[in-house]
Each structure stands twice: as structure tokens, then as C-alpha cells.
Image (tube, coloured by chain):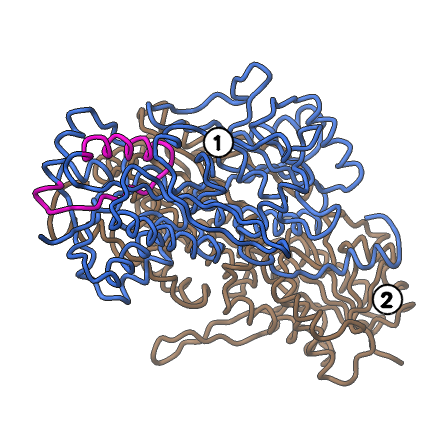
Chain colours: A brown, B blue
């Protein structure tokens, strides 16, 4: 019997989910025992509709484009599966001689993965999860493919916006970062800094209640000192009662469309402080940017795809590929893959721990920066600032 | 007497204004007749405060960083100069043996350039303008350094966001583009398309009155057809009475901070059509992105700097470096530099001509695409879409 593979994408895309698909395809080719690698066209709904495309038919140069294609090349869905859908799947897998089912997604998809595992247990079909989310909120794994690229994007972009604001320091710029209830991407903006005083000047995470008074105090003080202030704020900021500071503009069972936090905060600065302010909201732009993809993230995403298929071919099922960070003597970055029982990660949302947030709740700690830095894959580009040189050597106000 | 040069940056930055500065420095070195090249630290205000830094003292490897530094490395200002300021400048130029004054900026800066030219006429000091603006709204010149990179950014980003929206086609994404009263950047999003049906699906320019009813009709029709719709809208959209569709959030004499047009339109889609929608607003992110700098734009910015100094050394004054596009037999892109009398460009704002806008006012024409394409400097990256392949070969709805 031919051994076929099915890859399914769930939820919102990242800059490297297609890289994991590439990893599966490369592993399948090298293994010598796989017939077809089906992509489910349009996510889990694509399974039910038997919209299956064999990706092994495409030449290597086409497959390599996966490494530089954002979004998902096979499509995703937010279709809510019912119990009968899960049961129907087993027959579909059998019909297409699918022996290995790989689900690539975030918390919601890992939940689906666990449920498919349950119905496949007695059918000899192995089900393995490949983690994916820019939000980095999957439990147990040290980090999640997709996050490193989102982190590199926000870091490089914050550095660039910081340079822009400093060149003409007449306003407050509030940049919004994705991440829902988890502040990982917002926090990663701290990697923009090469020296003290660099942007971002304030970082607000959803893990701490947002205090408008303290925010305005901080902005005012920094504006008076610098003239140009860069704030990075999470889309998921909540007040002391746990309510979003801006009501969501659209809600479905599986997804929340957040209100414009950056726009709200910029307006607050204008109205309460009389200081010019503008907002930046590069949401999807960030998770779809290939130019600012992290090379480490891309390689790890390929690895996650390979390891998932390897595990399935070894008979593992009901597990997710996880990354465990190794302690190294010289402190350099190294990780290894472990298989994590899927029920330990299903629907659990991992947020930033307290030790990564400063006391006032307007910045991250050095420990966070140390943890995050290797994931963005190399230093940000060098820039030159003659204005700063002049001010340091010759003195004078801005 | 030593011949010194002064370079002054005005207004908001671009991704390549520092490349023009690099061009001036290279030309100065090669000429063998220039002593110092001063940067005015902090724009025209820096001249009055005599905050002058000689950039010739820096080694070549530092200067080359200018090519990859966004914002402005010497700083800019929006200081409103008075007549007495202009007169004071002549003495400052004399004191520092500055024979050539190069002002690098947009319409406002070219106005300043003309006024400095007037006071310098009898002092043997040559004053030349170097155009710069992402908005591309300077008169006579075919295009302006800074625009090509902003165009490449919006094109590549729209293509990436388009792929993201198509992978999970459940909403309308409204992206906002800078450009004030001129729609050039917004229009350049059309270069994202590689084939019919690609994003952007709708483009709204400030040159045409914005009609909410037609907008909602168009969005509804496309949503029903595609599921995922990408709209690119100018920050400067106005209604039939010439009023901004969203009131500006902050206004100064020299600058307007536009309201959040993308957020407003996304909310309109939600409220009037009940369709999910989200906004993207990568404003400063776009003008500061080095990863998506256009190589053609960068080269032309260097050239503009070189040519400005050459012109000044030739005794030209009261002129701006302009780009004139050549007709070529094979239709390939070529341009040459001409000097344009500064009074012909002062404060005049160039908007998109009618022949570049389609009849319904929701897209650009092929003539615009043909004009704009060479400026982004090469093709956008290739992507792969197995979902689209499946739908074309195997049929079936999204």
C-alpha cells in the first residue's frame, strides 16, 4: 500500500508556514517511502470536500518558491468542525491511502489535531502537529515557527521608524503590533535598540493592565526630553477590568478583529497632551513580509515540517513537534526538537511571563531580549546618524 | 579660497534622501576642488544655529552606510523661516566659506531654496535644489527621488497582503497609503499585480472625489466573488465638497496629520455591509523601509546629488535637478537630468493626470502602470499558489 501524506494549514498565515510545507516535501522525497503529499486546499474544510492536491508532482524549483511565499500556498480556513466531520475524515483518509496527517497551525489547529488524532487512533493513521503562529502563544515549545520572522519585522521596522522620527523629532509615533492576548511580537520591538535611548521608547503589553494616566505621563516626559517618541503597543491591550481599551470591531467564534489601538492612543496623546501624534498599523504587512523573514525562523520551520513527517513515519501520533532550547557553555543559541503530547498544548494560550516585563509595565527586561535575540536570525542592519554624532561631540539641543 | 558645500535636508524623510547626500560627497571627492561638505544638522534651522558638521572627515565605509540608512542622517526640520532668517544666512555662508548650497527636499523646501537663491544672488553663492519626496508631487520632473522606493514598498506589500488575504479569504483589507493630496503612492500599489484578479482589487485616489456608495457597491460585489478583497486608499481622500472624508487629527502651518482613512473605511464596510474588515496603515514603515528600497530610485538619488553639486560648481544657481524621461526605440527606460528654474517648481503641487485614472475612479490605467513600472527597479519576487492552481485545474469554489 502506498503511503500518502496529507498536510493541512489552519488559521492565519505566517511568513514561514510554507517553509514547513517545503520541509515535509523534502523529507518525503528523501525517505523513499512516500507516494503522494497532498495539500488540503483551503484548510480542514478542504479535507471534507476532498479538495486534495498532490504536491509531489511539482518540480523542485517550484517547491523552492515556498520558501519565499508568504500566506499559505494551499490555503487555510477558520471552518468550525463538528464531531461528524471528524468521523467522516477517517473514511476520506482511507480512500486516499493517507497514512500520515500533518496539521500545521496555532492553538485552534492543535485542538483540531487532537480531535483528528482521537478518530484516527484505531485506523493506523498517524496524526502529528506542526506548530505555527506569529503570536508565539503555543504552550511548552520554547517558541513557534512564524514568531521569529514577525519579531524580525517589528524589530527592523521599529528601528527604521525610530530613525525617521528622530530625524524630524516633532511627534509621537504609536505603532501597533499583532499578537492577540500575548505580547510576544510587541515585546520583540525591543530588539530594535542598538544603544540606550534608541526606539522603541515605550512598550505596552497585553499581559499588564493598561493605565492611561501612566502612559500619558511617560509620553510627556519622553517628548520633552527627545521631541520624537516611538511607542509600540499591542493590539490586545486591556484596562484594569480586563476589557479591551478599544472595543473589538468584529468578532466571530474563532477570531477577534481588534479595534485600532494605535489610532486610539495617538488620538489620546493629541487630545490630552496637545502633542502631535500619528499611528502606524502594519499588521498583515508584518506577518507577510518576506524581505524581513528571519533566516533562523525559516530554517526552523523547514525542520519542523521534516521532523513532523519523520515522527509520523516512526509511528508517532497525537504529538506536536516542539522546540526545546539547550543550555550551551558559551551561551550561544542551540535547540533540539522534542515531541509534545498534543493534549498538553491544545487550546492553552501562553503569555509572556512576569520576569520578561519591567516593573512599570512600559518595557521588557534584558532577560527577554536575551531570550528573543537569536530567533530574529542575525543583527539588524547598521545605520549612520551624523546628527547624533554632532550632538554628542559638539553639544547643543536637538 | 576653499570651496565648501552645504547640504540641507527639509521636510519628511524618504528611503533614499541619504543616498543623494552620498552622491554629493562622492562628487565632491572626485572633483578635487571641494574643501568641506557641511551637513546642516537639523535642517534649515541648523543653518541659522550654525550647527554644521563636515562630512568629508568620515571614512568611505561610514559614508556608504548612507545608502542603507532611512530617515535623514543629518536631520531635517519644519521650521518656518522669516525674511530676516534668509538675510542672516548669507553671512553664515560667507563665514564658513560655503560657496555651494544644496537644498534637498519637497515643494516646501524648493520654496525655501528659491528664497535662499534670491538672497545669495549677489554674493557669488550658488544655490541648487535636489528633489526629494515620497509623494512625487514636484512639478516638471518626470518623478522624484524617494517615490520609486515608496512605490516598490506599496507594490510588494500589497502583493504580500494580497497573498495573505487570498489564503484565508474571509475579509476585506483596507490599506492606507501616504501621499497627501497626490495619489502617486496609492496608485503604485497596482504594480503588485502579476495577472488579472490579483490584489489590489480597488484603488482610491485623492484626485477623484470619494463616493461612499460606489465604494460599498464595489466592495460588496468583489467580496461576493472572491471572499477576500484588498483595497488601497489614499490618506488624502476627499468627498465631493473637497473635504477630507476623515477630518485631519492635527494640523500645523507646514504639515497635516491625516485621520485614519483605512480604519474609517474598514469600519464602514463592517457597519454598512456586515462584512469583516480590517485596516493596515504602514505609513512611516513604508518610507523608511530599506529592504524594499528600489535600486533604480537609489541610483537616481545618488545621481541627483552628484548632478546638483556639478551644476553648482558650473555656476548654476536658482535651479533644481530634474529628471526627463527619454523616448527609446525599444520602449526601455532611460532618463536624463535637466536643470529646472526653481521658480517653476516652487510650491506647485503635481497630482495624477486624468489619463492615469480609470473611469469609475476605483483603479489606475495601463498607461500609469507603464509609466511607473521602471521606477520600482525590477520585478517583484515570484510566489507560488497551489490553491489557485487547484481551482484552475480541478475547479470548485474557494
Q: How crowded is mark 2: few (under 14 residues within 10 Å), some or many (20 or more)?
A: many
Q: Quadrant of residue B387?
A: bottom right
B89 part of magenta stretch: no
Dot 1: chain letter: B
In the rendered view, tell whether residue A127 sits above or below residue B54. Answer: below
Tell me the CA gap for discs 1 and 2.
61 Å
Left or right of B195, for residue B322: left
Left or right of B105, for residue B51: left
Q: What percent of the width, then of the height, locates residue A266?
A: 41, 32
Q: Residue at x 49, y 28 (%)?
A: B181
Name the image quarter holding the N terminus of chain A: bottom right
Question: Same chain for the residues at labels 1 and 2, yes or no?
Answer: no
Magenta part of the protein: which range? B93-121
Dot 2: chain letter: A
Q: What percent of the width, then of the height, locates residue B101?
A: 23, 43
In the rendered view, tell whether residue A40 sits above or below residue B52. Answer: below
Query: Can the viewer see residue A91 in this picture?
Result: yes
Q: In which quarter of the image is residue B278?
A: top right
Q: How crowded is mark 1: few (under 14 residues within 10 Å), some or many (20 or more)?
A: some
Prevailing secondary structure class for the magenta stretch in the rendered image: helix
Name the image quarter holding the C terminus of chain A: top left
Left or right of A160, for residue A324: right
Which is nearer the eye, A119 or A385? A385
Q: Which mark is residue A132?
A: none
**Residue ID for mark 1:** B350
**Residue ID for mark 2:** A93
B102 part of magenta stretch: yes
Query: Can the viewer see residue A361 in this picture?
Result: no
Which is nearer the eye, B384 or B195? B195
Amino acid at each position: 500500500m502506498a503511503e500518502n501524506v496529507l498536510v493541512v494549514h489552519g488559521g492565519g498565515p505566517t511568513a514561514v508556514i510554507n517553509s514547513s510545507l517545503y520541509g515535509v516535501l523534502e523529507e518525503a522525497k528523501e525517505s523513499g517511502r512516500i507516494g503522494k503529499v497532498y495539500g488540503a486546499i483551503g484548510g480542514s474544510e478542504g479535507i471534507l470536500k476532498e479538495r486534495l492536491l498532490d504536491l509531489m508532482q511539482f518540480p523542485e524549483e517550484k517547491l523552492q518558491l515556498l520558501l519565499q511565499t508568504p500566506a499559505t500556498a494551499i490555503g487555510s480556513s477558520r471552518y468550525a468542525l463538528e464531531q461528524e466531520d471528524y468521523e467522516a475524515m477517517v473514511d476520506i483518509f482511507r480512500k486516499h491511502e493517507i497514512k500520515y496527517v500533518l496539521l500545521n497551525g496555532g492553538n485552534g489547529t492543535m485542538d483540531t489535531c487532537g480531535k483528528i488524532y482521537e478518530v484516527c487512533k484505531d485506523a493506523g493513521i498517524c496524526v502529528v502537529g506542526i506548530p505555527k503562529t506569529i503570536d508565539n502563544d503555543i504552550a511548552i515549545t520554547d517558541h513557534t515557527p512564524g514568531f521569529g520572522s514577525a519579531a524580525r519585522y517589528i524589530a527592523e521596522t521599529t528601528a527604521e521608524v525610530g530613525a525617521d522620527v528622530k530625524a524630524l523629532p516633532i511627534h509621537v509615533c504609536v505603532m501597533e503590533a499583532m499578537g492577540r492576548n500575548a505580547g510576544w511580537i510587541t515585546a520583540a520591538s525591543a530588539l530594535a535598540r542598538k544603544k540606550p535611548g534608541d526606539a522603541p521608547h515605550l512598550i505596552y503589553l497585553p499581559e499588564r493592565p493598561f493605565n492611561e494616566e501612566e502612559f500619558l505621563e511617560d509620553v510627556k516626559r519622553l517628548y520633552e526630553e527627545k521631541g520624537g517618541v516611538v511607542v509600540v503597543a499591542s493590539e490586545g491591550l486591556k484596562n484594569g477590568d480586563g476589557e479591551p481599551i478599544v472595543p473589538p470591531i468584529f468578532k466571530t467564534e474563532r477570531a477577534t478583529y481588534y479595534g485600532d489601538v494605535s489610532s486610539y492612543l495617538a488620538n489620546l496623546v493629541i487630545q490630552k497632551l496637545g502633542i502631535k501624534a500619528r499611528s502606524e498599523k502594519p499588521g498583515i504587512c508584518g506577518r507577510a513580509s518576506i524581505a524581513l523573514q528571519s533566516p533562523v525562523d525559516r530554517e526552523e520551520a523547514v525542520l519542523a515540517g521534516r521532523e513532523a513527517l519523520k515522527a509520523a513515519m516512526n509511528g508517532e501520533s497525537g504529538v506536536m513537534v516542539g522546540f526545546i532550547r539547550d543550555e550551551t557553555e558559551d551561551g550561544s543559541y542551540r535547540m533540539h526538537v522534542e515531541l509534545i503530547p498534543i493534549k498538553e498544548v491544545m487550546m492553552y494560550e501562553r503569555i509572556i511571563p512576569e520576569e520578561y516585563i519591567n516593573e512599570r509595565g512600559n518595557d521588557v527586561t534584558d532577560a527577554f531580549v536575551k531570550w528573543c535575540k537569536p530567533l530574529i536570525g542575525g543583527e539588524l542592519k547598521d545605520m549612520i546618524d551624523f546628527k547624533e554624532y554632532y550632538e554628542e561631540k559638539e553639544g547643543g539641543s536637538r
